[in-house]
Structure formats: C-alpha cells, structure tokens
Image (spheres, grey):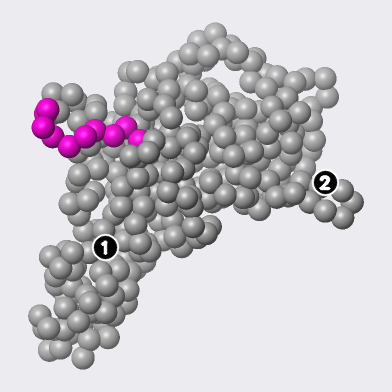
Amino acid sequence: MLPEGLPTGMLGEFKDSMRYALLVRQSFLDIRDNFRRIVDPSLQSTNGPKIRKQIVLDGPLCCGKSITLAMLVHWAREEGWLVLYVPRGREWTHGGYFYKNPQTGLWDTPLQAENVLKDFIKYNESHLRELPCQILDPIPLGEGAGVGLLKGVDSKEISEGSTLFDLVQMGINQMHASVGVVVRLRKELSLVKDIPVLIAIDQYNNWFTFSEYEEPVTIRSTRPVHARELAMVNAFRSMMHNDMMVGAFSHSTAVGKLRKDLPHVPVDARINLPRYSPDEAATVCHYYLRQRLVSREVFSEENWKKVYYLANGNGAEMRMLVPLMH
C-alpha cells in the first residue's frame, strides 16, 4: 500500500515490537471519517462535526502525525482512491540539481520530479491507465539534470487520447519534461471526477521556509531560494482549492517555528494531534508486554504509569522506556 516508503516512526515501531502492527487511535478514526463523509454525503449530518477537505496535522514531537497520515493513505487506497503520497516532503527542497526556468521564473528540480513520478506510478498504475488527460496543451521543457536544455525544442506535445499514465511516463522517460509533468499532474488531479483523489504530504512544513538552494547575486554573495520559488512546491503547496489534501508537519525535520496562519492554507485547517491518553498508553504498554519487550515479573500498573508520565505520552519515548522497567 505504501511503496513510496514508510515514515521513520512506523519503521521504529515495527522493528522494536517485532510485528507489523499499529495502534488505531481515535484521532485517526476522526480524520478518516471526515474524508469518508466528503466522498459519501449520505453519512453527513447537520449536527455532526465540520467537514474539512484540507487538513494540516500538527502537534508535539512524536505524537504520531506521520503514522496517522500513512494510515490514512493506506485506508484511502483500500477504498479504491487515487492517492498521491509524498512521505518525505523535505526532499522536494533539498539535494539534486536546480535551475531557474526562464519560461516560468521558478526553479526546476528535475531529479526530484523524476522521483515523485516514479513513486506515484508504483501503486496507482491501474487507475492512471484509465484516466484520460483533460489538458492537451504541450508540456514546457526545462533543463535536464547536468545536461542543459534541448536545442531548438521548448515543449513536448501530448497526443489525443493520452492517459495520465502516458503523461507520467513522459516525465520519467524525458528528464527535460519531468518538472513540467509534475506541475501539469497537479492540475490534472483537480479535474479527476471518476474516483476520489487525495493528496497527502508529509514533512509539509519544509515547504514554508527556505530551501537549501542559493542563487548567486554577485561574485561573493548568494540569496537563499525560498521553497515557494520551486516549481514543484509552488504547484502543490496551496490548500486554497476544492481538492482533498492533508499535510503533516514533521518536527524531526525541524525548520524553526512557523507562524500560525500559513500562506495559502485555510485558517481552520490545522488539527493538533494529541499525545497518548492514559487509555492509549495502557493499551500500548500491555501490547509491548505481550510482545515480550518487558518481562511479566516487573510489569505492573504502577510501572507502566510511571513510563507514561515520564514520557509525557510521547509514543517513541514510551517504547524506549518500557524495556527499562524494573
């Protein structure tokens, strides 16, 4: 379900508990039900919770934002949705080659674009083969990584009857078109009506600060390039639209404190995920006992509560402390 990669918190949980199992939390069920109601209006009620098409998951370090997002992607795919999942949004603003595209005035990152398209096709190929391209304008070409511009060609035609699979393949096979294809894909996803579409971005906070790229200004000085100046981030960052989109903040890839009202994000989009409640902590600690992370002789009600209060409900810290009970 998640061939693009798993969040590090999930991998840590699987490794330490020696099982591919996760706690299904109420906070996840609430978000899942929110999207379920959007797709099936018959589930909506007048006095029910407000429905949000765009959500930003926030909350303290290691409260489960990335895992909640990954579980939502898994659930949506089980339901047959088309999901664009980006588990490492930071990679869109760091590493690889970067070029200023004279046609757009934005910065192209062709290697990242190619990786995004390869990831997108991994799970979604069957859907993409059935969805026709609805915009047939030519794709503008940019520079390829380390190979410059194509001579005498500045765009690539999209033929009649092309599918979204053909579009994505064009970006994978033709590096000069990869950024243009990612930007076009964002527009195409908004036009898909046959199946629900969800855009899920982890490490979303990295798109509201400076990238690691710098533009030379004089011989001795450079100017940092902001994430919004990157063509791919520029295309996908905004939540001011009618599409279903979830972004999760990652405090382990901390980018400094962001202001509360983010540009191009609805004011009420942000949801704070809580750390474990005492009930969730009890469930998790007893699960670790069954998984033999701690011996029965030292496990007690008092001890697991000590772990809970020591870790302040932080799931990763609790997993680390449970084996230290004595």
Q: Which residue is mark 2?
A: 217
Residue found farthest to the top: 160
Quarter-wise, where is residue 148 in the image?
top right
Nearer the N terminus, badge 1 or badge 2?
2
Secondary structure at badge 1 equals: loop
Q: Residue at x 32, y 65 (%)?
A: 13
Mark 2 element type: loop
Circle 2 residues within 10 Å: few <14, some 14–19, many ≥20: few
Looking at the image, which is closer to me, 79 or 219? Answer: 219
Q: Which mark is residue 22?
A: none
The reply to whether the magenta stretch includes residue 84 is no
Between marks 1 and 2 in the image, the one whose residue lies nearer the viewer: 2
- Circles 1, 2 touching at the beta carbon (< 8 Å): no
> Is residue 190 placed above or below 227 in the rendered structure?
above
Instruction: Please name the residue shown 21% across and 34% down the image.
Output: 50
Q: Which residues are magenta?
A: 45-54
Using the rendered view, name the quadrant where residue 270 is placed. Answer: top left
Figure quadrant of the C terminus: bottom left
Which numbered tag is attached to residue 275? 1
Q: Position of residue 315 (x, y in %)?
A: 29, 67
Q: Is residue 209 left or right of residue 46?
A: right
User: Which is nearer the eye, 146 or 69?
Assistant: 69
Confirm whether residue 158 shows in the render.
yes
Residue 18 is at least partly visible in this image: no
Query: Residue 5 in the image: x percent, y percent?
Result: 43, 51
Q: Residue at x 22, y 75 (%)?
A: 308
Q: Is residue 175 left or right of residue 65?
A: right
